[in-house]
Image (cartoon, helix red, strand yellow):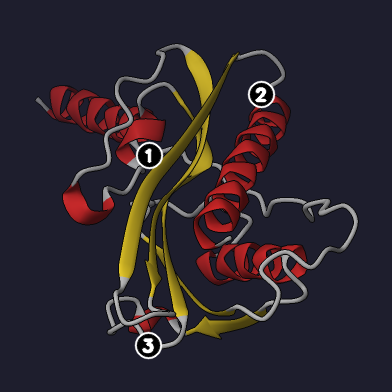
């Protein structure tokens, strides 16, 4: 009887380890902006960023939410040096847009690497309408994406545009976490490029 109990305990322990969330996160490298320009010159932009990811196990997370938010904010500021960029605190994410300004709300839906379906489990779903679809099984899935809302209140008639940005880079599980890290940076680079393109095109 005791032997059966021990075997059952061992099985439960192994099962817990097997199905525990395995999420890997590294801080993204500095984005290369290129030559400075006068794009969005004089535009007064409020940036507010929220992290909606569902990461329950931070054992392999080497980049905090605040570090990731700061990196994204610095990238936007560096991309448009002629604009007036104000970074708002995350708790102001749902606050009213200010008149005579542009408000850019960025919800981080994904920025992580994980094997198989673990990547899907950690993806956030801001506004309830962000679908990534099924991710490949038996591969490293590195995902980076944002739900972006731009409210342009520079005139009496406020304009609002929304975009979901989702990038997935899947690789065979060869090379372990090194493969995952490289793929994550690749996914982030493309998501970041789409983010800047959306901001720039909307506000020009």
Q: Mark 1 points at which residue?
A: 21
Q: In this view, does 33 lie to the left or right of 64?
A: right
Q: Is residue 68 left or right of residue 6?
A: right
Position in image of residue 22 (x %, y %): 45, 37
What residue is at 65 percent from the left and 49 percent from the top? 26
Point out the residue furthest to the right here.
35
What's the mark number on residue 176? 2
Q: How far apart are marks 2 and 3 (CA)?
A: 47 Å
What residue is at 31 percent from the left and 73 percent from the top? 158
> In this rendering, which labeled residue sits more in front, label 1 or label 3?
3
Q: How far apart are marks 1 and 3 (CA)?
A: 40 Å
Could you say whether the residue bearing mark 1 is in a helix, strand or loop? loop
Which quarter of the figure has residue 103?
bottom left
- Asked if residue 58 can be seen in this view, the reply is yes
What residue is at 28 percent from the left and 84 percent from the top? 96
Position in image of residue 117 (x %, y %): 35, 25
Badge 1: few (under 14), some or many (20 or more) residues near its Cα, within 10 Å? many
Position in image of residue 122 (x %, y %): 36, 43
What residue is at 87 percent from the left and 63 percent from the top? 36
Point out the residue furthest to the bottom here.
99
Of residues 111 and 64, the one drawn nearer to the viewer in this rendering: 111
In contact (CB < 8 Å): disc 1 and disc 3:
no
Q: Image height check: is 164 above or below 159? A: above
In contact (CB < 8 Å): disc 2 and disc 3:
no
Could you say whether the residue bearing mark 2 is in a helix, strand or loop? loop
User: Tag 3 or tag 1, which sits nearer the N-term?
Assistant: 1
Total number of numbered labels? 3
User: Tag 2 or tag 1, which sits nearer the N-term?
Assistant: 1
Q: Name the residue under label 3.
A: 98
Position in image of residue 167 (x %, y %): 51, 32
């Amino acid at each position: 009887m005791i032997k059966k109990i021990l075997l059952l305990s061992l099985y439960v322990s192994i099962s817990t380890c097997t199905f525990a969330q395995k999420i890997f996160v590294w801080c993204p490298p500095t984005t290369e902006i290129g030559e400075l320009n006068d794009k969005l010159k004089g535009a007064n932009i409020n940036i507010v960023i929220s992290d909606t990811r569902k990461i329950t196990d931070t054992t392999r997370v080497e980049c905090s939410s605040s570090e990731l938010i700061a990196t994204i904010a610095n990238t936007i500021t560096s991309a448009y040096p002629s604009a007036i960029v104000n970074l708002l605190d995350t708790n102001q994410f749902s606050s009213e847009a200010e008149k005579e300004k542009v408000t850019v709300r960025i919800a981080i839906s994904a920025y992580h690497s994980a094997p198989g379906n673990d990547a899907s489990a950690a993806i956030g779903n801001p506004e309830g309408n962000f679908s990534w679809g099924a991710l490949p099984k038996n591969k490293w899935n590195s995902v980076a994406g944002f739900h972006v809302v731009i409210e342009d209140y520079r005139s009496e008639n406020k304009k609002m545009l929304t975009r979901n940005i989702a990038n997935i880079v899947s690789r065979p599980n060869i090379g372990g976490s090194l493969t995952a890290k490289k793929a994550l940076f690749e996914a982030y680079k493309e998501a970041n490029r789409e983010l800047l393109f959306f901001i720039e095109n909307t506000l020009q």
